[in-house]
Amino acid sequence: MTTYPSHYINGQWIKAQSAETLPVHDSSTEEVMATVPAGTAQEAERAVLAARAAFDAWAALPVETRAAYLDKVAAGLKARTDEMALTIAREVGMPLKMARAVQVGGPTWHWSNFAKIARNFEWEKKVGNSLVVREPIGVVGCITPWNFPLSQITLKVAPALAAGCTVVLKPSEIAPVNAMILAEIIHEAGLPPGVFNLVNGMGPVVGEVLATHPEVDMVSFTGSTRAGKRVSELASQSVKRVALELGGKSASVILDDADMEAAVKGTISACMLNSGQTCSAHTRMLVPAGRYDEVKALAKTAIAKFSVGPSLEETSKLGPLVSANQRDRVLGFIRTGIEEGADVIAGGDQLPAFEKGYFVQPTILGIKATDTLAQEEIFGPVLVVIPYKDEEEAVAIANSTIYGLGGGVWSGSDDHAMKVARRIRTGQVDINGGPFNANAPFGGYKQSGNGREAGVYGFEEFLELKSLQLKPVAAA
Ligand code: NAD
């Protein structure tokens, strides 16, 4: 077990004020693998003031200097890939091989990519007699969740730093160890004191200081819609910019002319990644009513390949859920579905046979569009299948939740799929299983949020616009 006694403030590891610690559990064994300190409001404020003091000098550095720091962080992450992958496989529960690629490889790439984006960015543009310049917004408070912890930290901290902002990070209290390793890497990269700060702790204590503090210019939040609303309310008092990346209930719309086998397989994969603990997971599969039995048979075959097991076992395709709370929440949803009359196509509420670990069976339930599970974000390995009568109804069902994050459309023709995709009110739609694009904007419509992350779109979120009006040069 590793004990982390300190927060990272103003370029130093500062011993925590309070003796209270937060345990981090290995999701497969339930052991306490580490503890981090429960930060206080004073520690959060101290970090904010350090970030404020560091801002002017950091913002004034040449872009190339900042970009070079980001490249150093990427190199540091690359060098510690094994340790980071093992940490995330344990604290989140994603199988190790996949954690290495998705949870570490992805973020490492993003650190270099944001360096590249900053270098190539058009920082100034002439518009009539104005020079429009882009400037860093200032001090950014970053609040992140546990499901893709390093990724979510990276998609905020890396573009913010590249843009010239300084940062206070409050990582998830459930999976914070990866953040501690990242802070060590950032420290070794030699960033000036105060540019990056990390305070561990609970959302209502440390997170709320970031949301309310007048010296924080922007809060970038990823997490549940419930906590996002609270952050937004608090932040409105100081009119800071708020970027929210929240929950989802994304639909995979399978049209009648689709390759059913590919569509069902693709949807199940897009639902089950990280045991369904993915905000943009395709958790509703909408199928033509007349094809329901065929889809059911295909789904049973496809789900059988998702073997459940501890995250460090080679053969595990699905790991446990992150915590006992999350497991109980997901089981509660499965039970509600069954009580409301769901057709249990696979899985169910019985626990898989493991002595330890927060495991849930991958579950597929046939339900009606009006059922609870058609609306609520479950955040576990649970796919619901909802029949529709025609394309109009499919689009209406796809758009019928409070969320609007992701989704997919499957059809024999890409054009047909695109026509339907344009009617879906979400930030991303995959056409016939089109692969994830790490430079494309990621974010939500409706209550899935209002920010965009990744690529140049995610970078621009951390910039202000200023226009300088020049006097036209008199004609000679
Ligand atoms: P959560 O909302 O419980 O916690 C997220 C973060 O917010 C944590 O760091 C937490 O400590 C903090 N927090 C909680 N209450 C707070 C408050 N009152 N003030 C300030 N901060 C507060 O979410 P979670 O359980 O960690 O993550 C799962 C949720 O995140 C799911 O709903 C998922 O869909 C969403 N998510 C969204 C995206 C996206 O990009 N849209 C990505 C990943 C996860």
Image (tube, rainbow, N blue to C red):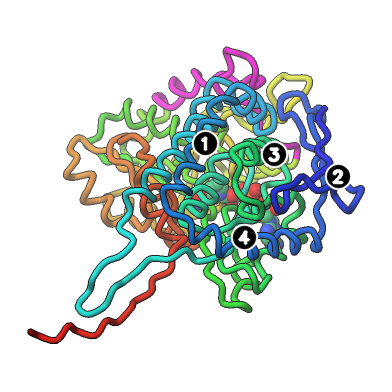
Q: Is residue 331 above or below residue 206?
A: above
Label whose residue precedes the other's in the sequence (1 or 2): 2
Q: CA distance from mark 4 to mark 2?
A: 29 Å
Residue indicated by mark 2: 21
**Foreground mark, 4 or 2?**
4
Q: Which mark is residue 54?
A: 4
Mark 3 within 8 Å of ligand 1, using the beta carbon? no
Residue indicated by mark 1: 72
**Viewer-nearest residue: 427 or 419:** 427
Mark 1 within 8 Å of ligand 1, using the beta carbon? no
Question: What type is the residue that disc 2 sits on?
Answer: Thr
**Viewer-nearest residue: 397 or 262:** 262
Q: Is residue 205 above or below residue 154?
A: below
Q: Which residues are magenta?
A: 297-324
Circles 1 and 4 in contact, beta carbons < 8 Å: no
Label 4: how many Cα within 10 Å (few below 14, some 14–19, many 20+)? many
Q: CA distance from mark 1 to mark 4?
A: 20 Å
